[in-house]
Amino acid sequence: MAKRSGVATSALRFYEDRGLIGSERAGSGHRRYPRAVLRRIAFIVFAQRIGLTLDEIKEELSKLPGDHAPNRRDWSRLSASWTSRIDERIAELERLRAGLTECIGCGCLSLDRCQLANPGDRAGRSGPGPRYWVGDPRPA
Amino acid sequence: MAKRSGVATSALRFYEDRGLIGSERAGSGHRRYPRAVLRRIAFIVFAQRIGLTLDEIKEELSKLPGDHAPNRRDWSRLSASWTSRIDERIAELERLRAGLTECIGCGCLSLDRCQLANPGDRAGRSGPGPRYWVGDPRPA
DNA sequence: CTACAAGCTCAAGTGAGCTTGAAGTCAAGT
DNA sequence: ACTTGACTTCAAGCTCACTTGAGCTTGTAG
């Protein structure tokens, strides 16, 4: 499974510990992965690139059927929220890119003038910070 | 400085330890930050959102003059590489978004058919993996 | 039959980016 | 003078996503 998926064995066992994937055991105690696990791993890798944490991914995986291969309907339930998440991140990056030429270029990259750099954004707080760059409406 | 920048005091001291910012001391031993530090912190926060590590940011900061406020020329030396970095990440996200509707929607999210999920990409290795999603040319 | 690669478990370690706690100093208000 | 709160250092702790190591078992090729 590690070879097929490109994910290290240690990571596979880690995912299993965390309940993201499952496995059956051969008589020897060795893991035998059901076919569906390959797809679940694909899902995990994909979701990680989008920026979800393993906990979030576990949540999402729980919305998928464990018994059958997920079908078009199953996926479409997920894709909406993911798409908007991707869109938001792209929008942020575009604002950052704009800031790189406009804002920095004009010498405005200073915390007193630009109200930049509130890491509270990461924690979801509001207050002073790079609100324009990270998504707040542009001040009048 | 923490108030002005929105960055926690603990983080400021951490940055100082790591050599990203400097400070002078009052007779009391308290830190007094030169004006330029505010701008350096803005830089750090900005660069983090783009996805640079603190080590990379330190590297970038070393290209800026320590003595005077960075001018337009100083910034433009940096902006090119940053812009392309942003562009690459946006391109990846767009591929992921496309995969979300095209690839997953069509049931192709499986490691055997899609050659998905090589976390080696993260480590810069090549081989089997989500090469199309993460940037390799689409296979014929 | 014997190597030896590859699997197993469980605990501990890694690295990035901070935060928290303990123990102490300094400055301002009443 | 005293209290309060902000500052100091240094070490230790935390989250995330894994990796590594020790010690042991299984499976297969020659």
Image (cartoon, coloured by chain):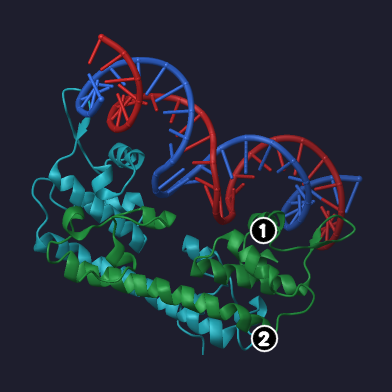
Chain colours: A cyan, B green, C red, D blue
User: Could you tell whether D24 is left or right of C27 in the image?
Assistant: left
Q: In the picture, residue B12 is in which quadrant?
A: bottom right
Q: Tell me which label, 1 or 2, sits earlier in the chain.
A: 1
Q: Is residue A70 above or below residue B103?
A: above
Other-residue count near label 1 (Cα within 10 Å), few / some / many at <14 / 14–19 / ≥20: some
Q: Secondary structure at mark 1?
A: helix
Q: In this rendering, do the residues under marks 1 and 2 share a single chain? A: yes
Eye-nearest disc, 1 or 2: 2
> Residue B36, percent across and down?
74, 74
Number of on-image labels: 2
Residue at figure coordinates x 14%, y 41% from the top left: A34
In the picture, the quarter occupied by the C terminus of chain B is bottom left
The amino acid beneath tag 2 is Arg
Residue B15 circle label: 1
Q: In the picture, residue A19 is in which quadrant?
A: top left
Q: Is residue A92 visible?
A: no
| The one of A126 and B21 positioned closer to us in this rendering | B21
Q: Is residue D3 above or below residue B21?
A: above
Q: In the picture, residue A50 is in which quadrant?
A: bottom left
Q: Secondary structure at mark 2?
A: helix
> Residue B59, percent across and down?
64, 65
> Residue A108, percent across and down?
63, 84
